[in-house]
Image (tube, helix red, strand yellow):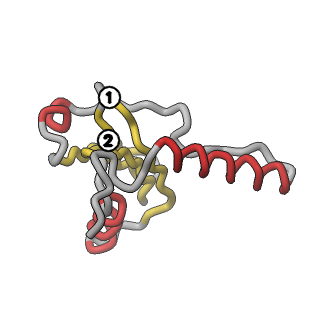
């Protein structure tokens, strides 16, 4: 198994590549690019700051479903694990936004799931 370092497989270099790809595709389609999580910054829960291996799950009920926010230390497979857990619980996922977020020199994986 390859060592992807402290930041996992995601890096600022890859983020720039993806942002550039989104911009070029939007230009080709004549649309404004939307980069998920681009300017959204969420509060990193204290228990995750203390132990990046911990996972925080917050649920905000809405009128037609809920928003599930998951925060943990960034690692390979985090998004897949959350998707699997929601799938096993037979939760209908409408959309998901996921991004890395830096705090005090550490990288955290953040995802927001719109479920119904």
User: Is residue 87 or residue 18 the one in the foreground?
Assistant: 18
Q: Are marks 2 and 1 in contact (CB under 8 Å)?
A: yes
Residue 69 vertical position relative to residue 105 in the rendered view, above or below: below
In the image, is 15 to the left or to the right of 90? right
**Place of residue 89 in the rendered image (x, y in percent of width and height, measured from the top left):** 27, 70
The numbered dot on residue 108 is 2
How many other residues sit within 10 Å of disc 2, few (<14), some (14-19) or many (≥20)?
many
Earlier along the polypeptide chain: callout 2 or callout 1?
1
In the image, is 49 to the left or to the right of 101? left
What is the quadrant of the C terminus in the image? bottom left
**Place of residue 70 in the rendered image (x, y in percent of width and height, measured from the top left):** 31, 48
Q: Does dot 2 land on a helix, a strand or a loop?
A: strand
Residue 83 vertical position relative to residue 40 in the rendered view, above or below: below
Q: Does dot 1 land on a helix, a strand or a loop?
A: strand
Residue at 28% x, 32% y is 44
Residue at 30% x, 29% y is 105
**Place of residue 25 in the rendered image (x, y in percent of width and height, measured from the top left):** 76, 55
Residue at 13% x, 39% y is 51
The numbered dot on residue 103 is 1
Spatial separation of the CA atoms under disc 2 and disc 1:
8 Å
Residue at 33% x, 46% y is 7
How many other residues sit within 10 Å of disc 1, few (<14), some (14-19) or many (≥20)?
few
In the image, is 19 to the left or to the right of 8? right
């Amino acid at each position: 198994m390859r060592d992807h370092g402290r930041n996992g497989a995601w890096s600022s270099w890859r983020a720039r590549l993806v942002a550039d790809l989104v911009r070029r595709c939007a230009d080709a389609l004549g649309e404004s690019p939307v980069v998920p999580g681009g300017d959204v910054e969420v509060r990193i829960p204290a228990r995750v700051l203390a132990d990046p291996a911990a996972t925080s799950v917050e649920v905000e009920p809405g009128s037609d479903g809920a928003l599930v926010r998951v925060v943990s230390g960034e690692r390979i497979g985090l998004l897949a694990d959350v998707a699997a857990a929601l799938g096993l619980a037979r939760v209908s996922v409408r959309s998901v936004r996921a991004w890395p977020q830096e705090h005090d020199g550490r990288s955290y994986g953040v995802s927001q799931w719109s479920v119904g």
